[in-house]
Every structure is written in structure tokens, then in C-alpha cells.
Amino acid sequence: MLTLWVGASARTTIPVDLGGDLQAAINRASAGDVIDLTAGATYTGNFVLPVHGGNGVITIRTRPDGQLPGPGRRVTPQDAPRLAKLQSGNSGPALRTAPGARGWRLELLEFGPTAKGNGDIIQLGDGSAAQSTLAQVPRDLVIDRCFIHGDPSVGQKRGIALNSAGTDIIGSHIEDIKGTGFDTQAIGGWNGPGPFRIENNHLEAAGEVFMLGGATPGIRDLIPSDVVFTRNYVGRPAAWTTENWTVKNLLELKNARRVMISMNVFEHNWVNAQSGYAILFTPRGERGAAPWATVEDVTFRLNIVREVAAGINILGHDDGGPSGLARRIQISDNLFYAFDRNKWKGDGFFMVITHGPADVTVEHNTVLQRGNILEADGRHAGVPIPIERFIFRDNITLHNTSGVHGSGHGVGKDSLNAFFPDAEFDHNVLAGGRASAYPPDNFFPSAADLMAEFVAPDAGEFELKAGSKYLTAASDGGALGAPMRELRLVLEGLRPERERNDLTPRRRRGSGAH
């Protein structure tokens, strides 16, 4: 959990009624003040959060009415009539920060699209070379329970440009971030050091819903770091499959360090401008302009990934120029299911892993994919680049045709020896595979027999039945696969009732789940 700089309680309330001068109120506010806006009123402009004195936070909010969501809850589009709205009248952002701005909180506000959906709705920090030192980076910022949206017909390039430090985005709803012929992000950042907390939001975009990296930082050697991404819904409407938006993936790290991604739902990713992988950990050095870029110390835990063309793509080094190494990535306790080739297209693989990342651990996942479990590639002078210290343990998977496969090698041990020479590969269910093709201490039921071990797989209930032999088959004597009860209870408890829509399996008495 991030700790933001906070100050004294509110000293003065500054009301800005319909037709009032919001920028003037922002300019004269002091640390601790609260700027109250009128519910339902629209404030048009390109507002700037300046540097202010003092050690407190200035809050800009809709005047409370007792009906809006309280702290810890999530705003929804249905709350919009009771929110004050900040609206850009041109292609510039509705709100941006001045260099070095510090201590601002945006609470219970609506932000509409820019003209023709160009640029960013909110800019926190500056993504250009004009922000070239850490002293220029805005910090100690909070966006809490805000409704941020593009135009339903035209879309929007980006909801929030996250190029700041010490920033929380919580309880918010971002939608209709979409475009054709260019990338779009609900939240995207590349020139802010962090830390960032992205918690309990609805995030919707066509391109990369959440992305760090992807452009050259103006600050040399900058790596966005210390990121908590938790309890978010991340996806897009399935109806967009029939529309002409440029679709890529759901979460991508191109330059990031120390990232915790936990307790999220990721859904609806299909083949379009990319090959359909939902989650990408792929360092990109921007063709030599940022050779320090890396993806390291990442934990992906207790997430549900469903209704996608393919799962995870991990790249060791940028294949388009110099970069750092992807390393120390842990993928554990997750559920991956509903890989539908007819609906989402793609290869249906769980994971593709290329160009030699190091220290990747994959354990206690339940993966019901439609293609390979692992597909490895990457060569130097014709020789496979080794993926060092790889651990694949205590998982439940479907083997399908090729299971574990490396380019130019056979299924199973031949590929493991070539691409994963020191791998620990044990205590996994590889349903439908052949034991002779794999190391010992793995399990090879038929796919039908595996499905019979679950409570109600056709209903999306993948808890192991009471008495299942896999409840004590893990390397530590516990259960194989993901902790379904924990996933269900955590996600059901944290998602607003009206947004659940069967995102997690229904609870069932006497399931015998672990």
C-alpha cells in the first residue's frame, strides 16, 4: 500500500457555483482547502493544478449530497447526473498539472471527452522531454471516485496520462477509450517514477487498457516503479468485436519495476492489431532511446483472466533494439479460462516466452486454455537462448496437441532441455499429455477425467471436488491449481453488486474446495 503525503484537515471551503470561475478558485486555494462544485453543473476549460504552498492537500469535489458513493466504493455511470463535470472545449486535456505541482485530490467528478477524442482527458505530469528532471514531476495526487469517459461514437486516445509520482487512482470508472489506427489506454504512463496505486476501478479501453512504458521517458534512466494494481475490472465490451476499433491487450508492462498485480478480473481480448494475448511483460527500449527499460520484480497473483484469445506473453529482451532483461516474474494462484478460438480467434496458448527472460515462476494456477501450455522461442547464432531458473509447478492445465513446445524442437522434454535447461517442472496436471514426454512427478489424466474433478466446470466452477486426488497432490502436500475459494471470496466481496455479472463462479455449499 502506498503512503501519500497528506496534510491538515480542510481550512476553508470554496464554493464554485454554475457559471463560476473554477480556475480562479484553484489558483487562490491554499493547502487544506476544499473546492466544492455544484452537482450536475458543467465547468468548461483546460484547468491547471498549480504549485501551492503549505503541506496539505487541496480537494476539488462535487458538493456532497449523501447519495454519492462513499470512500472505498466505486463510482458508476449512473452517478453522473449527481456529479459536477469538467469538460474540455478543445483537444487539450480537461485538467493537467503544472510542473512540480503537489498535493491535489480530485473527488466525485465527471470528466468528458476532448474534441474529436484527441489526446488525454487528464494529464498528470508531462510525458514529453519538457519534464526532464524529478524535481519537475507532480506528486502526491489522488483521483478518487471519478467518472472519466470518451465519446461513445468517436472514442478517446487516453483517459489518464500517468506521468507523475506518488499517485493514487481509486474507485473510478473509465470507459469508451477507443480509437482506430492508433493505440488507446484507459491509463498509460511512461515518464513518471511512481509509486502508483491503481485500486478498485473499472478500466475500459481498446488498445492497452493499462500500460507502463511504450514511449521514451524525458527523464533519463527512469523506470516506473512501486506499483500496486489491485481489485480492478479490466476489459472492454464484447460488442466491440463488430466495431472498427484498434484492439491490442488488457495490461502491458514495457518499462516497470516492482509491480504487484493482484485480485483483478481481466476479460475480452481478441485478435486484432495484435495476436490476442491478454497480459504482456515485454521490455521495450524504444529502438535504443531508452536502453535501460526493463520489466522486473513483477507479481501476478489471484487474478481471473477469461474470455481471451491467449494468455501471457513474456519477452526477455526487446527484439527491436537494446533493453534491460525481463526477470523475477511470479505468476501464481490465478484462474485462466474461456479461451474460445471461434469467438476470440488466436492460438489459444497459455504462455509464450521468448528471448530468454530469467527467474520466471509459474505455480498454483488453473489454466484451461485451447492451445499450448508453453511456447518458447528466441535464438542467438542459431542456438536457443536459455530461459534460466524457470519454475513450473503445482499447476492444472490442459495439454492439448503440443503442450510444452519450443521452436524447432519436440513436445515436452526435448523443448524443456533446449529452452529451459535448469527448469523445475513438477507436480503439474497436464491433462491429455503423455507421461513419457515429460519429467517425472507430473499427472496425466484425460481432459474428460480432469473436468470430472471440478465441482461444475460447465457453470464456471473450477473448485476441486471433495475427495479429489488433486487436493493433496501439490509439492507441499496441498491442493493443485488456483485457490478458487480465495479468488471467489475476494473478488465477490470487492466488486459492486451491479457489476458482478457472474464475473466469479456462484458460491455453492459443500463444494469441498480448497
Image (cartoon, helix red, strand yellow):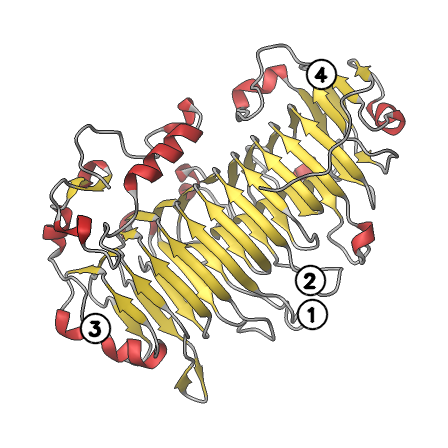
Q: Position of residue 103 (x, y in %)?
A: 77, 35
Q: Quadrant of residue 348?
A: bottom left
- Are dots 3 and 2 in contact, CB under 8 Å? no
Instruction: Say the numbered circle drawn on residue 41.
Output: 4
Question: Whole-Å distance between the Cαs marked 2 and 1?
Answer: 6 Å
Q: Nearer the viewer, mark 3 or mark 2?
A: 3
Q: Position of residue 220 (x, y in %)?
A: 74, 65
User: Crowding at label 2, few (<14), some or many (≥20) Cα neighbours within 10 Å?
Assistant: many
Q: Residue at x 53, y 44 (%)?
A: 229
Q: Nearer the viewer, residue 32 or 454?
A: 32
Q: Secondary structure at mark 4?
A: loop
Mark 2, residue position: 216
Question: Whole-Å distance between the Cαs marked 1 and 3?
Answer: 43 Å
Earlier-in-chain disc, 3 versus 2 = 2
Instruction: Say the numbered circle drawn on residue 289.
Output: 1
Earlier-in-chain disc, 4 versus 1 = 4
Visible residue check, residue 113: no
278 relative to 19, above or below: below
Q: Residue at x 55, y 45 (%)?
A: 228
Q: Residue furthest front?
A: 477
Earlier-in-chain disc, 2 versus 1 = 2
Type of amino acid under label 3: Pro
Visible residue check, residue 40: yes
